[in-house]
Image (cartoon, rainbow, N blue to C red):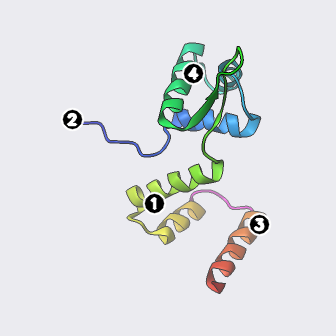
Amino acid sequence: MARQKVSGPTDKELSILSILWDKGPSTVRQVNEEMAKQQRTGYTTTLKLMQIMSDKGLLIRDDSKFQHIYKPAVSEEKTQKQVVGDLLDRVFSGSAGKLVMRALSAKKVSADELAKIKKMIEEIEGE
């Protein structure tokens, strides 16, 4: 059976991107130390993942210094939009309404989040 092509970053790649978005440009060792706080992972595994991500265009590697420094090639917002778009197509048949209703029913929404959602809906209706 052929493997399904993944269009966005994998879960592990998203973990690495999240660390880099939060911490800023970092070495493999720094990323690995952060990942190890959540789950046991080896340095060489993290290195290989980051090399693959660099080849895929997800990371930019600065090798002008002794230690290679990696930074995200894509913004957090752009990546989130891509992942949500893929999820929307694969799971919700392209229906944003179904996605929003499921998201709101899956977890309790704070009053602040609900106010932001209402404001966004009002802005969309006003366009």
- Foreground residue among 105 and 23: 23
Label 1 vs label 4: CA separation?
29 Å
Q: Which mark sits nearer the N-terminus, 1 or 4?
A: 4
Spot occupied by residue 116 in the image (x, y as percentages of width and height): 73, 69
Spot occupied by residue 31 in the image (x, y as percentages of width and height): 67, 25
Label 1 vs label 2: CA separation?
25 Å
Instruction: Name the mark nearer the viewer: 1 or 4.
Output: 4
Q: Which mark sits nearer the N-terminus, 2 or 4?
A: 2
- Foreground residue among 74 and 121: 74
What residue is disc 1 on? 88
Q: Quadrant of the C terminus?
A: bottom right
Instruction: Name the mark nearer the viewer: 2 or 4.
Output: 4
Q: Which mark sits nearer the N-terminus, 3 or 4?
A: 4
Label 2 vs label 4: CA separation?
28 Å
SS of the residue at dot 4? Answer: helix
Query: Magenta: predominant secondary structure element?
Result: loop
Q: Which mark sits nearer the N-terminus, 3 or 1?
A: 1
Spot occupied by residue 1 in the image (x, y as percentages of width and height): 21, 35
- Magenta-colored stretch includes residue 52: no
Q: Residue at x 48, y 58 (%)?
A: 85
What residue is disc 3 on? 111
